[in-house]
Image (cartoon, helix red, strand yellow):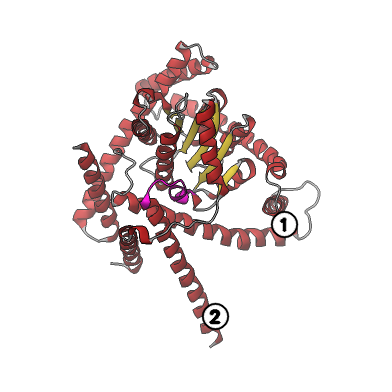
Amino acid sequence: MQIPALAGLILIFFSVILLIGLFLLKDRVKASFRDIPAFANFTKALGNAVENGSRIHFSLGSAGLSNSRTAASFASLSVLRQSAELSAASDKSPLATSGDATLTILSQDSLKIAHNIAGVDHRYEASSGRLAGLTPFSYAAGTVPTIYDEDISANMIAGSFGVEVGLLSDASERTRSFTLAATDSLPAQSVLYANANEVLIGEELFASGAYLDIGRTHLVSLYVQDILRWIIVATLLGGAAMKLLAGLL
Amino acid sequence: MTKLFAPAIAITTGVLVLLSYFLPNNTLVGLRVTIVQWAVILAGAAVFVGISNLLSIHFKKIMGKEKGRIYSLLLIASLIITLALGIFLGTDSPTMQSIFNAIILPVESSLLAIMAVTLIYAGIRLLRHRNDLTAMIFLFFALITMLGAAPLPFFQIPLVGDLIRPWVVGVLATSGARGILLGVGLGTLLTGLRILIGADRPYGGK
């Protein structure tokens, strides 16, 4: 086995052990987060939507299951299920649009489960999980009318996007609806920084599960992410220091 | 039954595919190829389901005489025509190629052009809804990078194109991007592991 493969395998095993270990520690691991106002504002927007009977729209991006950026879609599906559960009681049930067929099926499943948990099964419609287009720009073009015409009061744009996400956040801005946007793509993050109400930068998309209180595994996963980050920081600094020393000696 | 069956299948296939990338074993690699081929077939079937979903939504819009139903009609007509041409002439036929080159490509390029205008407008609007130091720094560096890269008609701004912009892009932007990408990589790893150990199940079940 080559060294990079071995290192990858060790990293995965180490992460799994940490994940399970911290999960088993249960209450000894206390939740303490840095404040990200975007999440509090999103929860407020969910509450407002339920109160005034408007709709929440989830835009899940274009990465399906056979894509290397699937993790962002999975993170957005977790947020969809939790938020749909909270807003399913609204007069108009939440909508999810996606740019990949497999993601559409998963979003329908998540919405159905959310309605079931909220005890409003009868309100679920299969058409609330929609395929808007199969290429990034056709997806954006197919989603913009949804933002304009479906009485949307809040948009959660989370998942894997390219720069086309700017068209979605612009439509949201024009309808004066709230937007929380998070993506794994750097160009899309810079576009969103310029024209979305609330934007999550970097890996904050993957922390959304812990912030929205989806479950203990999300919280533990965030801790493991932090531990791994510190290990990487220490390795990078150690490597730089060693190189500097080697140059001096 | 599904409650146990779906996670069991997902975890087993996930672990097998993951191990096949790290362990040099021909049986595992063969298994991975087969599983990935199955996934591709399933994804193809999912496209069919997705298109049916798209059709039903737009059909409902037309029937309900909703706003923008003319576009829904146009979408359904284009879908049927393209599908029929693809089935009878084949996807590699010159007609299908010209549909792609003469319709889809220019339309998507136009959307990209609209996107550029949208971004300029967003840049102007930025300080209105994000009036802080970070937004100012963001705008300043966006301007520097654009000025350094833009082909100006009569002269080039001294230092910006040949010194400042390469330093901003090569040092500041690259180091920042690497930091963000490391974080995204860790997030991706942990999301994958949560699904692999069955703690997170986006494929069904409560």
Residue B161: mark: 1
Would you say B142 lies left or right of A247 here? right
Quadrant assignment for the N terminus of chain A = bottom left
B111 and A28: which is toward the camera = A28
Q: Is residue A128 above or below residue B77?
A: below
Location of residue B132 in the rendering, given as x and y in whole percent from the top left corner: 70, 51
Q: Which residues are magenta?
A: A205-216
- Amino acid type of disc 1? Gly
In this view, the residue farthest toward the bottom is A249
Task: Judge if badges 2 and 1 mark residues of a common chain.
Answer: no
Q: Report if residue B105 is visible in the image.
A: no
**Chain of the residue under the numbered disc 2 shown in the image:** A
Q: Between A106 and A92, which is closer to the camera in this rendering?
A: A92
Residue A200 seen in the current view: yes
**Residue A156: x and y, percent?**
51, 38
Residue tagged 2: A244
